[in-house]
Amino acid sequence: MARLVVYGRSSFCPDMYRWKKWVEQHPLDYVEFDIDRDDEAYDKVIGWTGHESVPTLVIALDDGVDPIEEPRPLGDRSPRAFDRGTMLTEPNLGQIAPFLQRHSIPFGGEGGSEGGSAEARVERASGEPPSGWRRLLGI
């Protein structure tokens, strides 16, 4: 089985705002990592995209947090709205449902698949905030 892992951020980001609005209309279960508070998550997103590109949607194994398959190479292009197989970064709203459907991730709401949740269940993967705040402050 696979699950959706979302790398996002707690500071304002228009792409995260659009993602949250989409989830309100199409509830689903996912695990979320905050790159503003989790240095390991931050490093993963930078490694995969070269930028603080959020949301980065990842199809992972049930107990995993990394893409099931190695993401397609970026080459010279931006990671924005580029479906890399089991990773989709900064998606356009029209890309989300087909990406989730292709990977058998159930979601509800208008246009969603059967079996979606009535409410989104988000597991926020965070403990004590690591030193990420230092990076934000430039210390």
Image: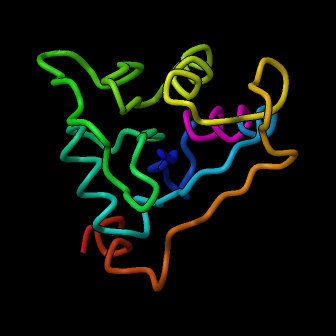
Q: Main secondary structure of the magenta part?
A: helix
User: Toward the viewer: 100 or 36?
Assistant: 100
Q: Is residue 75 placed above or below 127 in the rendered structure?
A: above
Frontmost residue, 66 versus 51: 66
In screen coordinates, is 42 left or right of 81? left
- Residue 75: x, y in percent? 12, 18
**Residue 92 position by quadrant:** top right
What residue occupies the far left of the structure in this picture? Answer: 75
Query: Is 72 or 138 nearer to us in this picture?
Result: 72
Quick one: which residue is furthest to the front in this view? 1
Residue 87's quadrant in the figure? top left
Q: How many marks?
A: 0
Position of 1 with respect to 49 (left or right) is right
Residue at image x 43%, y 69%? Answer: 37
Quadrant of the image for the C terminus? Answer: bottom left
77 left or right, relative to 57: left
> Where's residue 1, x and y in %?
48, 46
Q: Residue at x 36, y 80 (%)?
A: 130
How far across and how far down the image is residue 44, in percent?
25, 53
Residue at 46% x, 55% y is 62
Q: How is the image coloured?
A: rainbow
Quick check: 130 above or below 29? below
Q: Residue furthest bottom?
A: 128
- Is residue 69 located in the magenta-colored stretch of the structure? no
Magenta range is 15-22
Locate residue 23, reporting x and y percent.
72, 38
